[in-house]
Amino acid sequence: MSGRDSTERSGAAIEALRGPPLVLGTPTPASLTRSLLAYVFGAPGRAWWTLFALACLGLGVFAWALYQTFIHGVGTWGVNVPVAWGFAIINFVWWIGIGHAGTLISAILFLFQQRWRTSINRFAEAMTLFAILQAAMFPLLHLGRPWLFYYLAPYPSTLRLWPQFRSALPWDFVAVSTYGLVSLIFWYLGLIPDLAAARDTAKPGFRQRLYALFALGWRHSARHWHHYKTAYLLLAGLATPLVLSVHSVVSFDFAITNLPGWHTTIFPPYFVAGAIFSGLAMVLLLMVPARAALGFEQVITARHIDNLNKLMLATGLMVAYGYVQEHFFAWYSGNVFEEAAYAAKRWGPYAPLFWGQIACNVAIPQLLWFERIRRSLLATWLIALVVVVGMWLERFTIVVVPLSHDFLPSSWGVYVPSPVDLGLLVGTLSLFAFLFLLFLKVIPPVPIHEVKEVLEEVSP
């Protein structure tokens, strides 16, 4: 037996010991390419058109909400005194958190050489970009004059009108724009070999020319692969610190204030854990139905679902620890205002939302300890949906309760969202779904070249 054959058989044996196979069956590279591109080149089904129509209907609601905001101002929202931050900041923090799973799955697992990431990383990366787009809109709308958004950027103004660098708004601008740009480049770089495969497979015409344009002349040469691997590794290393930095910066919007319930040092790691938790839930929420609709059971196996569930369970335990610690710190501080702020979460007018958050983010995810639950697609999808809702409730209680229950009882108030607030939330969900559905039809949702590499490694 040659040394290469021995190495390949050893790799296959090691992969077999790790768990179920990452690719079912023994497909050839050509058949794998055809199967992964079949949905892109095929005609959309009835389910796709139904979801696309619903997304377009939601975009109509979004247009109405934007019209009300631009023409009549933020007075159409439910914000008041003292709750000056409402749905806009809640949705901003929620959406930017959802985008963190893409970087975790793509960059961090790549650096740790976790081969099971290969079939799911493009779903996560696309979700990251679309979530960042939704998140970026809300701080701009919250300005009241969104057409002056460039005031947030530290550009060399000839009027010597510089942004206030001690404000969290320029921090958010730099953090979100950096994260979005690096994520876009990382996503596009991983697409180039598959765009070339789509170019070589597509029928002659406009679509083939479009794929050829974005494939940048890729010819699968050894030189191309060498530069690709080097650039991908460097970008993965660059993107990894962003997982910790971006949502830590977002948490500073709250932690740098003196408001009870916000002024706490646990917020940066607590926000990062919650962001990854919600992002993993959104990946499963999208991937489980897409896997069945696209017929990708061969490359997105039960092992992928099981591993994502394990990660979601681990980050959920971190979030639960953060919940315990923030309430413990409030009690241990002996600060009557801090204690009152957290007591308002537990027993105040928003208590049902708080206990719903605990049920969704702490109690129900404990079902993932059981392998049978982790391997069940229906149970996985329902738990992921519950977690996504629970993390939105968490953002609501973080933003609204401290503002509505501050130092003076005479200034306490209750926040009720307006129809425009609800329209903006429904609209961003619809825009997210609209972009994701287009992604499934235009770009190969599973990295073809990476799955082929896995197939070659585990097949002697």
Image: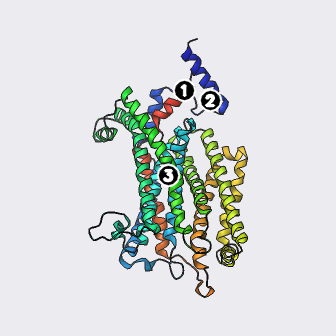
Q: Which residue is mark 2?
A: 15
The image shows residue 317 at horizontal and vertical percentages of 68, 54
> In the rendered image, which quarter contains the N terminus?
top right
> Earlier along the polypeptide chain: callout 3 or callout 1?
3
Look at label 2 and name its amino acid.
Glu
Q: Which residue is mark 1?
A: 457
How many dots with numbers?
Answer: 3
* Left or right side of 378 for 158: left
User: Could you say which disc has been placed on residue 242 in the image?
Assistant: 3
Tell me if I can see residue 102 in this picture.
no
Q: Which of 449/259 is in front?
A: 259
**What separation in Å lies between label 2 and label 1 (alpha carbons)?**
9 Å
Look at label 1 and name its amino acid.
Glu
Query: Is 206 drawn above or below residue 396 in the view shown?
Result: above
Residue found at the far top of this picture: 1
Q: Which of 440/246 is in front?
A: 246
Q: How many neighbours does mark 1 have within 10 angstroms: few (below 14), some (14-19), or many (20 or more)?
A: some
Are the residues flagged by discs 2 and 1 in contact, CB closer than 8 Å? yes
> Earlier along the polypeptide chain: callout 3 or callout 2?
2
Residue found at the far bottom of this picture: 410
Q: Which of 152/114 is in front?
A: 152
Q: How many neighbours does mark 2 have within 10 angstroms: few (below 14), some (14-19), or many (20 or more)?
A: some
> Earlier along the polypeptide chain: callout 2 or callout 1?
2
- Front: mark 3 or 2: 3
The image shows residue 290 at horizontal and vertical percentages of 52, 46
What residue is rendered at 57% in x and 21% in y?
8
Tell me if I can see residue 287 in this picture.
yes
> In the rendered image, which quarter contains the C terminus?
top right
Are the residues flagged by discs 3 and 1 in contact, CB closer than 8 Å? no
